[in-house]
Image (cartoon, rainbow, N blue to C red):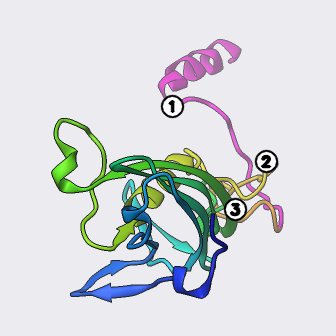
Amino acid sequence: MTKPNLLNIILCVEFGVIKMLQLDVARLKRSPGDSESYELAAEMPPLIFSGEEFTFAGPVKASVVAENKDKVITAEGKVCGELILRCSRCLKPFNYDFEIVLDEKYVSPKEAGEADLPTFAGEFIDITPEVINSICLVLPMKAVCRDDCAGLCPECGCNLNESSCQCVLEDIDSRLSILKELLEKNDK
């Protein structure tokens, strides 16, 4: 196994397609049984998922070990970074740290056959699509800045984490308003 070096940190833009996290496997693909370590870092563009745009607070970092396992190149490691999410309760942006495990297998197009594995051609494997898919899988369904976030007042919109308001909230389901009217008639 070789130590990571600056040649393994590759960022390039080809014909308007951003390829950010790439593994240089030129030597590795000619050496079955060999492995190589990569330390990658890339500034990622905003991520659009489920109609929302998420921006990255800094570079996405990956520590990957690639191994040539006879016609299949495996890429295993960890990817970490920080996204800026919007709290679903108070709507304030906050930083969300993520760390994902990368465990992918790649084959050349001529070896793909029936296998449902990502393919690579040439001297590089672009792991960016798999990293983005993995990030989407770790996103919370409802992002909250903190567990005890009070959110916004439904009447005036005041952020209840920063101040209180004088609104009187009646917590009544509108579908039950007729029952409320009947109770008020009975009280009279």
Q: Residue at x 44, y 78 (%)?
A: 45
Label 1 vs label 3: CA separation?
Answer: 39 Å
Residue 48 magenta-highlighted: no
Residue pointed to by mark 3: 97
Disc 1 crowd, CA 10 A, few/some/many (<14, 14-19, 20+): few
- Asked whether, in this view, residue 118 is left or right of residue 177, the answer is left
- Asked whether, in this view, residue 67 is left or right of residue 80, the answer is left
Q: Which mark is residue 147?
A: 2
Q: Which mark is residue 174?
A: 1
**Residue 164: x, y in percent?**
83, 61
Q: Is residue 23 visible?
A: yes
Residue 171 magenta-highlighted: yes
Give the mark nearer the N terminus: 3 vs 2: 3
Disc 3 crowd, CA 10 A, few/some/many (<14, 14-19, 20+): few
Which range is magenta?
163-188
Say which amino acid is labelled 2. Asp
- Quarter occupied by residue 61: bottom right
Q: Which mark lies nearer to you, 2 or 1?
A: 2
